Each structure stands twice: as structure tokens, then as C-alpha cells.
Image (tube, rainbow, N blue to C red):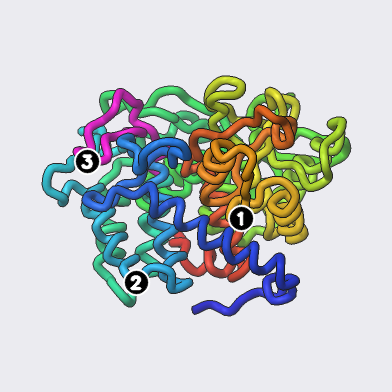
């Protein structure tokens, strides 16, 4: 088991108790969203409904594989390796009655599939969701390579079962195709964004392809990070996409930080990562009547409150809904954020001890809505008589909670040692 960080060692007892509970629950939410027969993971944990949901997200399945590596390391699940192998076998079509939807020509996966059969549920063939699956598979392969080397073999097979050439749209400007349709790449998206993961995996799998190499070297290599588009919050430079007049949701910065080897170790990217964290925190301070521990521009569902799923960002966050998992994701550059999470827990969302003898229905819904801890919440509704009970937690967005708490306790080496380098 990895050593623990000084940050974790020095936590006060009450904060450490909270941390330990929230950390383990960051895994338990994934376990509650896993199909035991196929090993596929639901798109979301349904707080007020039945689980696991019937709709699998292929991206969530990739994070589920990483959660199993964490659970194995922490001693939470003695069957973690066995579960990871089942998941990969299902993705490769080796589980009876489950054939996960893929593009026949290129091997890219459908975004949403049926949890039991793998059938595509009216969704696009997605390059980023496929990349999140493959990244999780390779991560698990590295973690379990001594205990169960078969997992690494399956992960490598998965990586190489895909023809990554179709992701390249414009190798000079870093434009990556988001969708594959009938073997061709479509819906081009210029840099910068989380699709840097797609470019990384393409380079890892097909180093002989010059277009793929140029896509990475011209745009995403460590030496090119400062040349990516930027926007300033006050005087703080923050990476953004081709529209240099708009900010990105904070998860866009977080996924490459944890899942792309060069970015996980890059001092330059860490600098921009710290800037993104600072901009997020400072923007929340501009709002009236918001506590200092409330921040986090993340993505997630708003069902029952203000409409559907939304990727919140600076200057584009309808009704100012905060995402606690974003705070967790930034802990490597802002470790004091653990006290922001503790304050939120202690003062507003004591999810494991909440009672309301005068309104047992409120107690039931509140405990269910936050069964696995802090996630998406409306600051304006926390203390209202008619409060908002979040109905779902999307697993891909929840991943920042898992990553950040793991890094806080075990250090970023937990990630850098398990990321496969090209």
C-alpha cells in the first residue's frame, strides 16, 4: 500500500474522520452503479430511484476500472481484480449475451449502451468516451499487472482494437473529431479541451502514424502547452478552447491532469491547473451571500430544479449550482479545499448523520440524495423549507471526487505510476 501524504497525516481528527468516510464513499458510489453480471457501469447513480440504472456510460465504465484500482490499494474490495477483468471482457465481447456497441470499421464505442446486452442506446460513437474507457483500462492494467496480468493483456487488446487515425481533423491546429460515423470522423472540435486524452491515446497506440504524431507534437506536447488558447480571469491566465472569450468548465482541466502522463507531471500544466482553481474560487466570491467554502464550476444534472444536464463555467452557470467534486479534484494544488468540503458537510450536508424528526420525508429524501456524500448542490436551496433533492449523480463528473481524494491521501504518484507512457 502506498504511503500517505503529510497533508493527510496532519488533518485534525474530525476532518480525518469525514475524509475517510467521503473517500471510501467515492468508491462505494461506483460499486452501487455497477452491473454485477457484465461489470459495466451506469451513467448515473439514481439517488431517489433503483440502481444500477439500465443505461451504461462507456466513460463511466472507464472510471469504474480506476475505482477498482483505488479499492484494491485501500483494501476495500478483495474482488477488485476479478471485477476489473470481467468489465474488460465485457467490453471486448467475451461475456455471453453482451456485445457492447461499437463502430464496425474503427472500433470506437457508443457513448451509452444497455447494461445487460451492450446494445447502443440511440447514442453517438464517441471518441472522448472511448478514450475514458481505454484510459481506465490501461490504468487498471498497470495497477493489477502483478496480481492479475491478464487485465493488462485485455487493456492492451482494447487499446489496439481501435483505429485512432479518424480522430485527426487538423493536425496543425489541434482539431479532433468528436464523433465517428460509418468509419469517418465528424464534429471537429479545436483545442484546448479534455480531448487531449484522445490525442494521447492515439499516439500511444499508433506511434508509426505521422498525422497522429503531428497532432500531438504540434499542439499538446509539454512544450506546446503555453501556446494553447488562453483567457484571463482578472490577471490570471487560464487555458481555454478556440473561443478565447469564454471559460471552460473546471472538469476540462481536471481530466487531463489525472489521466494524461505528460500533463500529470508537467510543471507548466500544473501552473495552469492552479490558475484554473484560483479563477473558479475567486469568481464564486463575487456572488452575494455565498460562503467562502462554496465553489466548484462542474458539470452535472439539475433535474427537478433548473432543467437538465449542464456544464457550468465562469460566466455561464445558470442559478449558480456548485459541484463539490470539483473542489476535491483541485486538492493537489489547493489542499486547503478539504476544509471547504468539511465545512459544507458539517454545516449543511451532514449526509451520514442527518435527522429531521419533524419531517421524516425530508430526512429520507435528504439522506438518499446525499447517500454517498457531497456532490452537486444549490447553495440557495440548502436552508430553504422546500429544498432541492438531487435525483442523480453522473459518474463521469463524480470521478473528480475519487481522483482528488486519492491524490490528497496517497499523492499524485498513485496516478503517475499507473499511467501508461508513450
With 18 as the anchor, is 195 left or right in this view?
left
Which residue occupies the extreme front position in the image? 358
Q: Secondary structure at mark 1?
A: loop
Please tell me in which quadrant of the rendered image residue 209 appears: top left
The stretch of residues the image draws in magenta is 110-131
Q: Earlier in the sequence, mark 2 or mark 1?
A: 2
Within-10-Å neighbours for mark 1: few <14, some 14–19, many 20+: few
Secondary structure, mark 3, is: loop
Asked whether the viewer can see residue 229, the reply is no
Q: Is residue 129 left or right of residue 24?
A: left
Between 216 and 403, the residue placed more toward the observer is 403
Q: At 41% from the left edge and 70% from the top edge, which residue is drawn?
A: 72
Q: Earlier in the sequence, mark 3 or mark 1?
A: 3
Q: Which residue is mark 2?
A: 78
The residue wearing badge 1 is: 353
Query: Which is in the foreground here, disc 2 or disc 1?
Result: 1
* Up-down relation of residue 151 to residue 351 (above or below): below
Q: Is 30 a magenta residue?
A: no
The disc placed on residue 390 is: none
The vertical placement of 254 against 82, above or below, is above
Please tell me how crowded label 3 is: few (under 14), some (14-19), or many (20+) other residues with Cα within 10 Å.
many
User: Considering only vertical position in the picture, is 27 above or below 189?
Assistant: below
Dot label at residue 116: 3
Residue 376 in percent (x, y) is at 61, 39
Marks 2/1: CA–CA distance: 28 Å
Amino acid at each position: 500500500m502506498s504511503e500517505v501524504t503529510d497533508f493527510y497525516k496532519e488533518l485534525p481528527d474530525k476532518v480525518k474522520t469525514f475524509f475517510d468516510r467521503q473517500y471510501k464513499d467515492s468508491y462505494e458510489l461506483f460499486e452501487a452503479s455497477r452491473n454485477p453480471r457484465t461489470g459495466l457501469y451506469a451513467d448515473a447513480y439514481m439517488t431517489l430511484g433503483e440502481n444500477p440504472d439500465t443505461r451504461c456510460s462507456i466513460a463511466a465504465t472507464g472510471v469504474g476500472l480506476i475505482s477498482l484500482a483505488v479499492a484494491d490499494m485501500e483494501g476495500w474490495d478483495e474482488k477488485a481484480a476479478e471485477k476489473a477483468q470481467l468489465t474488460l471482457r465485457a467490453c471486448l465481447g467475451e461475456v455471453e449475451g453482451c456485445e457492447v456497441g461499437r463502430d464496425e470499421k474503427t472500433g470506437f464505442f457508443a457513448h451509452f449502451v444497455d447494461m445487460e446486452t451492450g446494445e447502443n442506446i440511440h447514442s453517438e460513437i464517441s471518441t472522448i468516451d472511448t478514450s475514458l474507457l481505454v484510459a481506465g483500462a490501461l490504468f487498471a492494467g498497470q495497477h493489477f499487472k502483478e496480481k492479475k496480468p491478464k487485465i493488462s493483456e485485455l487493456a492492451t487488446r482494447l487499446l489496439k482494437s481501435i483505429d485512432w487515425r479518424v480522430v485527426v481533423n487538423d493536425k496543425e491546429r489541434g482539431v479532433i473529431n468528436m464523433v465517428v460515423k460509418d468509419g469517418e470522423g465528424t464534429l471537429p472540435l479545436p483545442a484546448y479541451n479534455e480531448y487531449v486524452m484522445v490525442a494521447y491515446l492515439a499516439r500511444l497506440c499508433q506511434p508509426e502514424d505521422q498525422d497522429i504524431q503531428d497532432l500531438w507534437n504540434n499542439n499538446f506536447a509539454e512544450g506546446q502547452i503555453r501556446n494553447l488558447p488562453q483567457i484571463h480571469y482578472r490577471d490570471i491566465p487560464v487555458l481555454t478552447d478556440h473561443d478565447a472569450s469564454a471559460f471552460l468548465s473546471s472538469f476540462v482541466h481536471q481530466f487531463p491532469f489525472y489521466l494524461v502522463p505528460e500533463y500529470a507531471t508537467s510543471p507548466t500544466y500544473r501552473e495552469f491547473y492552479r490558475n484554473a482553481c484560483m479563477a473558479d474560487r475567486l469568481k464564486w466570491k463575487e456572488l452575494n451571500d455565498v460562503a467562502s467554502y462554496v465553489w466548484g464550476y462542474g458539470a452535472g444534472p439539475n433535474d427537478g430544479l433548473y432543467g437538465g444536464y449542464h456544464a457550468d463555467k465562469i460566466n455561464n452557470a445558470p442559478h449558480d449550482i456548485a459541484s463539490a467534486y470539483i473542489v476535491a479534484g483541485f486538492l493537489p494544488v489547493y489542499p486547503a479545499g478539504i476544509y471547504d468540503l468539511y465545512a459544507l458537510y458539517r454545516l449543511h450536508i451532514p449526509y451520514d448523520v442527518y435527522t429531521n424528526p419533524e419531517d421524516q420525508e425530508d430526512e429520507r429524501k435528504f439522506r438518499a440524495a446525499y447517500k454517498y456524500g457531497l456532490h452537486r448542490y444549490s447553495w440557495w436551496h440548502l436552508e430553504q423549507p422546500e429544498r432541492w433533492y438531487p435525483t442523480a449523480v453522473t459518474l463521469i463528473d463524480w470521478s473528480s471526487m475519487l481522483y482528488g481524494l486519492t491524490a490528497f491521501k496517497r499523492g499524485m504518484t498513485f496516478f503517475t505510476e499507473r499511467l501508461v507512457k508513450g
